[in-house]
Image (cartoon, rainbow, N blue to C red):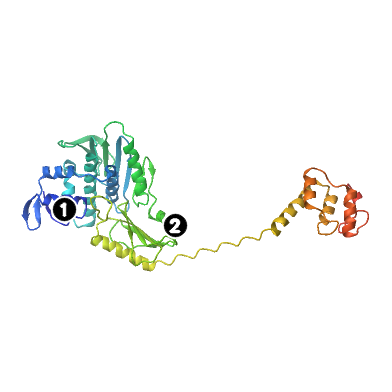
């Protein structure tokens, strides 16, 4: 196994860099890896969070198949099962799954993406075993649906098995075999996927439920969004101004997984960008490598910053209505309506006409009390008050002409 040396810039590169110091030189800038030695070195590598192997599977799925159409289905449990769509492994790739970690990456975009997907699948398999899994079963179906399977165990020989029957074409299955009944690991796997993959462009299904919302869900509904022009297939980005969000920031997802939030010096406060890109990370899987690819993404984000308009001014809140007079008027209306409903119509109209400040004015508190108690004022009482207010004789209402004795006509 031969490989050109390069800067140790992510998980695979860091391991290869360590092996290069122990490998056999084969010329300027090259070395030869011993497969057994490479497997031992790789087996010693563990993720900061052992259960984060599921995130490596998500990243592998994002690179498999057509750009922007990746899909993975995950069922966490004592036997966690994941299906990656659009990825079929050859016999050679299944017989030596960890060779992908150390293989040189081709330059052609489609071949490069596939090689990276195989690399991430191998790292996920290794991380699951290093975390204590009993075994990992890899099964792949080719374009004709022919199924091949291999069981990967620590310090065990790998034997490829061709299975009877047909499977779904161009699909690879990853099955972690746990050690007995486990509760905490599956729960943590779900939390990792939900917490760090909800804005992914890749379709992610957990326990038969899609959980990815897409990049747009990371911005407010009313934000004026600009698209970030990113090179490379399957990469996407959005930007907007968000009032009150503070320092300008860039949220980076790598292949569908939230990796890092980066502050943007020199950009307007409130500027917010979110991207889903294929960038390399360090051994912790939490820190992006500041290389040429990262610089290109940052440059595209800053170009979008110059196109994003300022956030709209918030609409002024309506002034509160004055208290006191309005409340008293509303109460007066309610009491008078109550009088019309409870009292006979002529008597109700007489009492309404007597509202005012004069000597015959109706007391609202008293009228409300008597209406609610069913104690309607007598017709004579209403007539006397009416004469004091409007001067009408015999209880006649000054506007309608109805008298107190006209009820029932």
- Percent from the top left, x then y, of residue 235? 31, 57
Residue that appears at 85% across and 47% down = 377
Q: Residue placed farthest to the bottom in the image?
A: 306
Q: Is residue 61 in view? A: yes
Judging depth in this view, the residue of 193 and 360 nearest the camera is: 360
Residue that appears at 38% across and 40% down = 208
- Percent from the top left, x then y, of residue 218? 40, 55
Say whether residue 328 is left or right of residue 292.
right
Kindly identify which numbered label has been placed on residue 156. Answer: none
* Disc 1: which residue: 104
Q: Is residue 406 in view? A: no
Judging depth in this view, the residue of 283 and 228 nearest the camera is: 283
Say whether residue 333 is left or right of residue 133.
right
Q: Earlier in the sequence, mark 2 or mark 1?
A: 1
Characterize the local packing of mark 2: few (<14), some (14-19) or many (20 or more) Cα atoms within 10 angstroms.
few
Residue that appears at 88% across and 54% down = 385
CB atoms of marks 2 and 1 within 8 Å = no
* Count of number-bearing discs: 2
Judging depth in this view, the residue of 397 and 234 nearest the camera is: 397
* Disc 2: which residue: 220
- Percent from the top left, x then y, of residue 269? 40, 64
Q: What element carries label 1?
A: loop
- Percent from the top left, x then y, of residue 242? 43, 61
Characterize the local packing of mark 1: few (<14), some (14-19) or many (20 or more) Cα atoms within 10 angstroms.
some
């Amino acid at each position: 196994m031969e490989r050109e040396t390069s800067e140790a810039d992510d998980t695979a590169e860091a391991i290869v860099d360590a092996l290069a110091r122990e490998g056999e030189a084969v010329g300027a800038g090259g070395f030869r890896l011993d497969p057994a030695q490479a497997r031992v070195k790789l087996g010693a590598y563990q993720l900061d969070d052992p259960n984060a192997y599921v995130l490596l599977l998500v990243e592998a799925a994002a690179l498999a198949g057509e750009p922007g159409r990746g899909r993975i289905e995950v069922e966490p449990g004592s036997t966690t099962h994941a299906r990656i769509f659009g990825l079929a492994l050859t016999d050679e790739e299944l017989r030596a799954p960890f060779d992908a970690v150390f293989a040189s990456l081709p330059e052609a975009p489609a071949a490069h993406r596939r090689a990276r997907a195989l690399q991430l699948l191998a790292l996920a398999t290794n991380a699951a075993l290093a975390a204590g899994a009993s075994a990992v079963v890899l099964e792949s179906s080719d374009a004709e649906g022919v199924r091949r399977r291999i069981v990967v165990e620590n310090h065990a020989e790998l034997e490829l098995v061709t299975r009877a029957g047909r499977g779904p074409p161009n699909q690879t299955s990853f099955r972690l075999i746990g050690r007995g009944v486990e509760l905490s690991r599956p729960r943590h796997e779900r939390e990792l996927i939900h917490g760090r993959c909800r804005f992914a462009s890749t379709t992610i299904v957990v326990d038969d439920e899609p959980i990815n919302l897409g990049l747009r869900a990371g911005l407010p509904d009313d934000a004026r969004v600009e698209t970030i022009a990113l090179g490379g297939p399957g990469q996407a980005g959005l930007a907007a101004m968000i009032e009150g969000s503070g320092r300008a920031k860039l949220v980076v997802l790598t292949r569908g997984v939230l990796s890092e939030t980066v502050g943007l010096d020199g950009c307007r406060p409130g500027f917010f960008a979110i991207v889903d890109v294929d960038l390399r990370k360090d051994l912790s899987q939490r820190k992006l490598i500041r290389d040429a690819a990262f610089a290109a993404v940052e440059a595209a984000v800053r170009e979008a910053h110059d196109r994003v308009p300022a956030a709209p001014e918030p609409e002024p809140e309506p002034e509160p209505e004055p208290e006191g007079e309005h409340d008293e008027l509303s109460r007066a209306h309610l009491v008078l309506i109550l009088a019309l409903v409870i009292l006979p119509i002529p008597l109700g109209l007489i009492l309404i006409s007597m509202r005012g400040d004069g000597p015959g004015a109706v007391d609202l508190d008293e009228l409300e009390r008597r209406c609610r108690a069913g104690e309607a004022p007598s017709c004579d009482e209403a007539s006397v008050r009416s004469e004091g207010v409007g001067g009408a004789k015999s209880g006649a209402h000054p506007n309608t002409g109805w008298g107190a004795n006209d009820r029932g006509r």
